[in-house]
Amino acid sequence: MGATYEFYKGLWKENPVFRMVMGMCPTLAVTNAAINGVAMGLATAFVLVCSNIVVALIKTLIPSKVRIPAYVIIIATFVTIADLILAAYFPDIQKVLGLFIPLIVVNCVILARAEAFASKSNVRLSILDALGMGIGFTWALTLLGIIREILGMGSIFGISLFGEGYISWIIFILPPGAFLTLGLLIAFFNAFSKNKAEDSCCH
């Protein structure tokens, strides 16, 4: 049960975006289209899993005084790999995401998992934790991207849904639309969780 929980907690109960409200920079900046949310989420998940594995493997070799700089170096290595992979195989997406790929290095989700979990757990649990958090981060960014793209451009993953006559709400692909969409989604999920908890108590 413990191992299963470490995976599933990131999907919902401790979702980095909707529950923990972490990693807001890429969440707000790149989710004006669904494909951007998927790409950023998967890149972050890749770095998260790889860095968690390495930190869990070498945690006893890192002096406590330099553990944070050491974690940053480990994370930066995998961010560089992710950036090079995107540049080689998905150059258009890499150009759109731009600076936000290198900024994964300072994403508090990744550093927090390295410090709070991987440095205190074995490799198996660290992988499950990273996978759960990575998938949770990816689906949250993808959902934001889908909503903003549909409302702001009338399309999803670049495919038009309503034809040429659709009057788009441009605000949703602009920065204010990111804050508005995220705020409404957080409010919705908080209300859903509250109702679910109340139902559990009643039964």
Image (tube, rainbow, N blue to C red):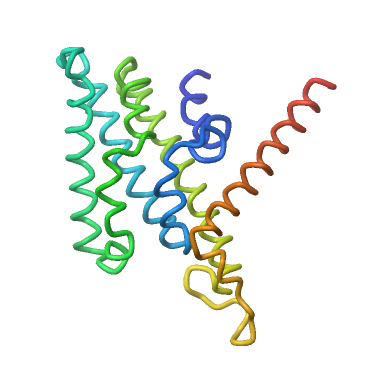
Q: x, y (%) of residue 23?
A: 42, 40
Q: How many marks?
A: 0
Q: Looking at the image, is 65 positioned above or below residue 124?
A: above
Specify the farthest residue to the front.
176
Q: Looking at the image, is 23 positioned above or below residue 66?
A: below
**128 and 99: which one is in front?**
99
Rendering quarter of residue 76: top left
**169 and 59: which one is in front?**
169
Quadrant housing the C terminus: top right
Q: x, y (%) of residue 28?
A: 46, 51
Specify the farthest residue to the right.
202
Picture residue at 37% right of the left edge, 52% below the top:
40
Q: Looking at the image, is 134 positioned above or below residue 177?
A: above
Residue 88 placement, left or right of 112 = left
Q: x, y (%) of residue 142?
A: 49, 54
Picture residue at 17% right of the left edge, 26% below the top:
70
**111 and 171: which one is in front?**
171
Rendering quarter of residue 18: top right
Picture residue at 25% right of the left edge, 58% below the top:
86
Q: Looking at the image, is 86 positioned above or below residue 11?
A: below
